[in-house]
Amino acid sequence: MSDDDLIEFASEFRAGILGERSSAWTCAMVCWPLVTLLNLHGVSCEAVESDLGDCNHIWIKLSDGRVLDPTADQFNYFPKQYPPVYLGPRTEIHP
């Protein structure tokens, strides 16, 4: 699956779960079933839980070490602004 396909897949899955609701506090309910579905589609990945101090965050680690975070935008109070679905290297919310 290409990066564009992966972002589209995760975006559509997120939309199906969240609809128009905010992604705040929804990382587990989006990531855990998405990891299962991605693995069924041949994308090797695992769910990771990070302790961010005031909360924990669930995100997806791809087999190449990159992050797929379908609820990254819930952390847009950090200096960096995240897209709804983040794909890339680890950041301060993916330690």
Image (cartoon, rainbow, N blue to C red):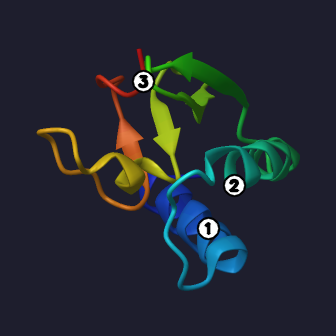
State how far apart marks 1 and 3 are (Cα).
19 Å
Seen in the picture, residue 58 relative to 7 is either above or below; the reply is above
Residue 18 found in image quarter: bottom right
SS under mark 2: helix
In which image quadrant can residue 79 be found? top left
Look at the numbered discs 2 and 3 and tell me whether their residues touch, using CB distance below 8 Å: no
- 14 and 53: which one is in front? 53
- Mark 2 vs 1: CB contact within 8 A: yes
Q: Where is residue 38 in the image (x, y as percent from the top left)?
A: 75, 48
**Residue 30 - label:** 2
Task: Calculate the distance from the C-alpha at mark 2 to the C-alpha at mark 3.
Answer: 16 Å
| Mark sitting on residue 28 | none
Q: What type is the residue that disc 2 sits on?
A: Val
C-alpha span from label 2 to label 1: 6 Å
Local packing at callout 1 (Cα closer than 10 Å; few below 14, some 14-19, many 20+) is: many
Q: How crowded is mark 2: few (under 14 residues within 10 Å), some or many (20 or more)?
A: many
For residue 17, which quarter of the picture? Answer: bottom right
Left or right: residue 4 compared with residue 76: right
